[in-house]
Image (cartoon, rainbow, N blue to C red):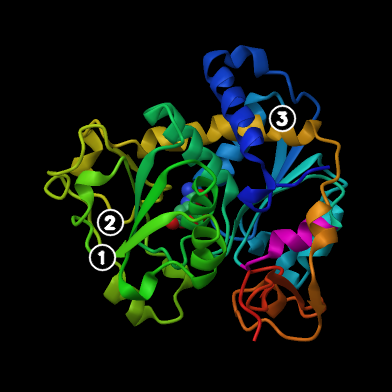
Amino acid sequence: MKHLIDIKDLSVEEIDELIEVAKDIIDNPERYSERCMGKILATLFFEPSTRTRLSFESAMMRLGGNVLGFSEPNSSSAAKGESVADTVRVVGGYCDIIAMRHPKEGAPIVAQEKSIVPIINAGDGGHHHPTQTLTDLLTIKMEKGRLNNLTIGICGDLKYGRTVHSLITAMCRYDNIKFVLISPEELKIPDYMKKDVLYKNKVSYIETVDIEEHMGELDILYMTRIQKERFSSADDYIRLKDSYILDLEKLENAKKDLCIMHPLPRVNEISVKVDEDSRACYFKQAEYGKFIRMALILKLLNEKKINNEKENVEEKLINKITCKNLRCITSVEQELDQIFILTDKENGIYRCKYCDTKGE
Ligand code: NCD
């Protein structure tokens, strides 16, 4: 059985296959309309969502399957204090595959350890969002025709934006990728992304606060929302919320075939006037999400192999240090072991198994 928790759980070859299947679904939807007859997808959304949940549900229905689940924790036993592990153990008996979203980082890792059915991470706190990344990769492939040789601008909340973390992780595996990372000082990408992903893969990147500075070099501009729900101070959010508003004037020096993306929801980051520009791809992107999720559900339901290789080779510290990240699942589910993995042997750096925070 295979789960999708982090985009790295899929090899580049597997991603290519998923993209090919998604393209075939787009061209021949009728061939797929009964592939999941008799199968059930559970959507466990402990945090709000429109696109992701509905696109998962639509994907399963378009495959001829059924769906059940909840869209907010108050309508589930989580409101009574049930652990993620218990919820997943029970729901696994009612369905064949689970897509879950949780505000705490690492919650899907806890789920996968207890689950008897495949788990898909539909977003964990400010950490990962691998199915949005599959959506983004399909969009890039469809719109640009390639996943290599690209200069990608990513703008907005690079600190808390989980779609950003998963997208950078995925794109680092393709050739000749350059990033222009545009954010306010306070919302730069986390340290673990720089060290464990960009630096490790020798991918070149520039950090800037100015959205126009490198506009003319970009093949892709990925706009993101400032993640209000992850801020501990309302004042900080108010100060930073309108840091970037993309309008036609700012696009003046942009390439004619720039692809403007956004995982949505948009708050104020892209002026509605940009919607009519041929370079605006964000609504198409949302639609591609359904097709790639159809391909993913098919793949995971057909996968039998247990993929525990990563588990066996890692050096760990168990219950020796405590994770300091208040957004980590271990901060609320205190019976979980505190597990830290040696991610950088040279410098002796351990990171939390659930949320990647550096152990101190
Ligand atoms: C994103 C998310 O939930 O992280 N939305 C989505 O899944 N389409 C982006 C966001 O909420 O800003």
Please determine whether, in this image, residue 198 is positioned above or below residue 145: below
- Location of mark 2 (residue): 268
Cβ atoms at labels 3 and 1 below 8 Å apart: no
Q: Is 111 included in the stretch rendered in magenta? A: yes
Spatial CA span between label 3 and label 1: 40 Å
Toward the viewer: 218 or 286?
218
| Mark closer to the chain start, 1 or 2 | 1
| Apparent side of residue 249 relative to residue 73 in the rendered image (left or right) | left
- Location of mark 3 (residue): 298
- Secondary structure of residue under mark 1: loop
Q: Amino acid at mark 3?
A: Leu
Spatial CA span between label 1 and label 2: 7 Å
Image quarter of the N terminus: top right
| Mark closer to the chain start, 3 or 1 | 1
Cβ atoms at labels 1 and 2 below 8 Å apart: yes
| Mark closer to the chain start, 2 or 3 | 2
Q: Amino acid at mark 2?
A: Asn
Report x, y in % for residue 242: 25, 65
Number of other residues with Cα within 10 Å of mark 2, as a class: few under 14, some 14 to 19, many 20 or more: some
- Secondary structure of residue under mark 2: loop
